[in-house]
């Protein structure tokens, strides 16, 4: 009907083929190739043809013509071969098989629609946009379906898309074939997307079986351009294909044609288009006069198209077949008749008229190849190099609730465009992947280079995942070791140089340790200043000024130890760390030991005998010398340590191979005992004497303060030193920070326990700073 409508418009247009009338003679092929060949051969190649009437009776000898149709690829293939033998141009409006683009085999075949190669490309674009990589393909086992499958298989070679299963369905499948096909689809449970190039009758059987098995919402269907004609009364079918996507040649609605179509009566169709008359009879469930089916009532001649009848949008491809022939003949008339009317009645001997009447099939083909006109879509139409129409499709999505196909996108110039992001997803958030992406630290164990399925295997420690992009754009991942000089980044993608780490100001929590040390330094300096200012007072003299000064020096060195650890290790800093580690405690507890021994000698019988016989030994200077001698022992041990293991900077790798720690040699091994063993011995001796002098007179309360300081220091040493020695392979930075904090706490305890009460009296109770109070 669209072809006839367009033909009438052309014959009524004085600007196209003036003086010439186009006539169309139609026959039915019933979508059967053998019937089409019979019609073509039996009717002297007069199947669905155009006749150019120049005023004489229409005969085969004075007409110039071509063929329109058939509408399917399966029928077009054999007819195109036959018509090509006689140089007869054929333009079809619906067959999309890529095989028909072979101009060596089908030189006279034209079509106003694009090859399925582009429809397949549009499908693949939808698959890519939704990351549907694992899909099933089902198609009719005929020229149309097999060619579509070949195009799909070829185009996904260079993509990450692969087929889970490919199913060929015969032309008229029985129930067992349908059952087997659906079982094959369901066997790949992760392939949720099905691409289908099947006839509507086969489709109805497939989706019916899917619904019967209870998988109505399981598949996302992407169908070929035949799907938009799907009709059924089965509710389950609409549920199965709800959200399906399909394609149709781009065409704008032609309201004027639709209006005229709905006005045509059955009586008019009997003489105008017998096929439309039969369609009206079928639509109204009646029979035409002379029809053998007597079970139906006779049709009323005034019947028109029912209002519920849907006009398919794919009309312009049919109209363009008529327009292409018309404009080709018009161009031939213009060229061969010098732009005038080729009228045989007027120009009996006109040479140009003879040329126009004798126009060869090859010439008609050339005119068709070069034809160009504005079609009903208001687009410029022309055939491409393969004599195919423009590759433009409307993308339709099926709404199962309303039972209607709605346009949701367009494929134009090789790109797909959608009205919204949800439309391209079809049914919804369907996932069609055989295997999920591997975590960052795992690689894909995949068999072959074209597979969507793999296993995720963890890489070894300090390895990265590398990708090898194959020809099909599949990232095949493997593991690569970073070696000893590099470390894997947190995402396991790049090997980076192993970073170095040490206790520094870059660590936020180190500032807390530094604050403790700084507070201790300030308090120690203040204590020094107050002692110096009150040097001759009774309280300071009674506390042993010289030994107290020695203790303060040791405390000061204890707080400074933190700063030796908070900078990048160097050989000089490693020397200072070793010295300060053992020497600070030795200085403190050598003096404390002499103090407690002095108190013990004074308050026991042995002490009284010593006071009587060796009174000079209890004077300040001999006590200071004795403390220095005790300190000299530590210096001697440190010298031995330096000789056995000279100080230098070492790099040590963490257990997780993510960082190299900069450390001083000797500070991370059992050699550290050389520097700490002697100070520990002094602490134990101080503890012993502190216990002995715990019952001294209350007035002489310094003994109790010393005892408290020594007891606490002993507890800290017991907890601190083993922890430091054992923790040599985990977080070295945290270990050093804890070690520095422990030393600072030791210094603060000595400072507050032994000097706090005296400073309180000096500053806040100066009236008690006299001989009577102090003893």
Image: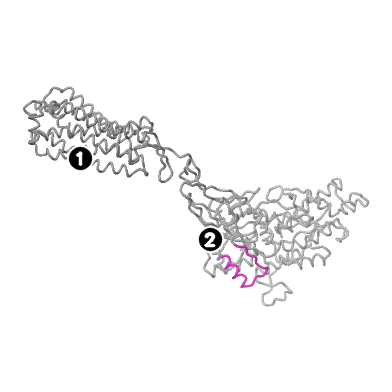
Numbered disc 2: secondary structure: loop
Along the viewing direction, whichever of 578 and 625 lies nearer the viewer: 625
Residue at the right extreme of this rendering? 349
Q: Residue 181, relative to residue 579: is it above or below?
A: below
Q: Residue 738, relative to residue 373: is it above or below?
A: above
320 magenta-colored: no
Tell me the number on the disc at residue 684: 1
Residue 428 visible within the image: no
33 relative to 444 in the view: left or right:
right
Residue 659 image point, x, y percent:
42, 41
Q: Which residues are magenta?
A: 165-185
Tell me the number on the disc at residue 377: none
Residue 602 image point, x, y percent:
9, 33
Q: Mark 2 highlights which residue?
A: 190
Residue 84 visible within the image: yes
Q: Residues within 10 Å of mark 1 (few under 14, many from 20)?
A: some
């Amino acid at each position: 009907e669209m072809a006839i409508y367009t033909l009438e418009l052309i014959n009524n247009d004085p600007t196209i083929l003036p003086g010439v009338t186009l006539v169309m003679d139609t026959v039915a092929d019933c979508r059967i190739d053998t019937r089409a060949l019979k019609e073509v051969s039996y009717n002297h190649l007069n199947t669905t043809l155009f006749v150019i009437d120049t005023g004489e009776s229409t005969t085969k000898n004075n007409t110039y013509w071509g063929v329109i149709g058939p509408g399917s690829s399966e029928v077009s293939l054999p007819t195109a071969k036959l018509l090509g033998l006689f140089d007869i141009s054929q333009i079809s409006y619906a067959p999309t098989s890529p095989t028909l683009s072979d101009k060596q085999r089908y030189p006279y075949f034209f079509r106003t629609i694009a090859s399925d190669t582009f429809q397949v490309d549009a499908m693949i674009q939808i698959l890519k946009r939704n990351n549907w990589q694992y899909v099933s393909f089902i198609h009719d086992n005929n020229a149309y379906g097999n060619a579509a499958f070949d195009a799909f298989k070829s185009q996904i070679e260079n993509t990450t898309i692969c087929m889970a299963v490919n199913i060929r369905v015969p032309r008229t499948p029985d129930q067992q074939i349908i059952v087997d096909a659906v079982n094959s689809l369901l066997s790949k449970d992760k392939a949720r997307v099905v691409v289908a190039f099947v006839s509507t009758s086969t489709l109805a059987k497939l989706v019916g079986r899917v619904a019967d098995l209870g998988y109505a919402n399981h598949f996302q269907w992407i169908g070929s351009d035949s799907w938009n004609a799907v009709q059924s009364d089965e509710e389950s079918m609409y549920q199965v294909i709800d959200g399906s996507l399909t394609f149709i040649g781009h065409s704008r609605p032609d309201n004027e044609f639709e209006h005229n179509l709905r006005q045509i009566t059955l009586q008019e169709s009997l003489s105008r288009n017998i096929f439309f008359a039969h369609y009206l009879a079928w639509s109204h469930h009646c029979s035409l006069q002379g029809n053998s089916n007597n079970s139906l009532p006779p049709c009323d001649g005034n019947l028109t198209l029912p209002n519920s009848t849907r006009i398919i949008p794919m009309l312009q491809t049919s109209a363009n077949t008529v327009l292409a022939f018309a404009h080709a003949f018009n161009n031939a008339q213009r060229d061969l008749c010098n732009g005038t009317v080729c009228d045989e009645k007027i120009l009996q001997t006109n040479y140009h008229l003879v040329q126009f009447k004798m126009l060869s099939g090859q010439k008609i083909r050339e005119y068709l190849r070069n034809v160009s006109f504005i079609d009903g879509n208001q687009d410029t139409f022309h055939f491409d190099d393969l004599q195919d129409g423009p590759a433009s499709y409307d993308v339709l999505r099926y709404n199962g609730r309303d039972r209607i196909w709605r346009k949701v996108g367009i494929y134009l110039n090789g790109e797909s465009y959608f009205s919204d992001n949800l439309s391209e997803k079809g049914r919804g958030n369907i996932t069609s992947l055989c295997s999920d992406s591997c975590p960052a630290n795992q690689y894909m164990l995949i068999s072959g280079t074209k597979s969507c399925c793999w296993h995720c295997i963890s890489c070894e420690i300090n390895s990265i995942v590398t990708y090898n992009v194959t020809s099909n754009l599949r990232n095949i991942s493997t593991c690569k070791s970073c070696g000893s000089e590099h470390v894997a980044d947190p995402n396991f993608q790049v090997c980076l140089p192993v970073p170095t780490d040490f206790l520094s100001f870059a660590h936020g929590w180190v500032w807390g340790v530094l604050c403790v040390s700084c507070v201790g330094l300030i308090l120690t300096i203040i204590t020094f200043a107050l002692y110096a200012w009150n040097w001759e007072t009774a309280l300071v003299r009674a506390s042993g000024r010289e030994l107290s000064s020695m203790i303060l020096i040791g405390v000061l060195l204890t707080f400074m130890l933190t700063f030796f650890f908070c900078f990048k290790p160097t050989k000089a800093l490693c020397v200072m760390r070793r010295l300060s580690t053992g020497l600070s405690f030795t200085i403190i507890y050598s003096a404390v030991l002499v103090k407690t021994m002095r108190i013990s000698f004074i308050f026991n019988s042995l002490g009284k005998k010593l006071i009587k016989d060796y009174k000079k030994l209890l004077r300040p200077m001999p006590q200071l010398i004795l403390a220095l001698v005790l300190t000299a022992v530590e210096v001697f041990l440190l010298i031995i340590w330096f000789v056995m293991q000279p100080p230098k900077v070492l790099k040590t790798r963490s257990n997780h191979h993510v960082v190299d720690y900069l450390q001083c040699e000797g500070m991370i091994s059992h050699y550290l005992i050389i520097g700490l063993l002697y100070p520990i011995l002094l602490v134990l001796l101080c503890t012993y004497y502190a216990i002995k002098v715990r019952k001294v007179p209350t007035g002489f309360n310094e003994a109790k303060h010393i005892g408290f300081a020594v007891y606490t220091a002993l507890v800290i040493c017991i907890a601190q030193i083993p922890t430091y020695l054992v923790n040599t392979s985990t977080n070295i930075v945290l270990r050093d920070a804890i070690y520095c904090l422990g030393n600072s706490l030791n210094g603060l305890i000595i400072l507050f326990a032994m000097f706090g009460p005296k400073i309180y009296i000096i500053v806040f109770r100066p009236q008690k700073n006299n001989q009577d109070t102090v003893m």
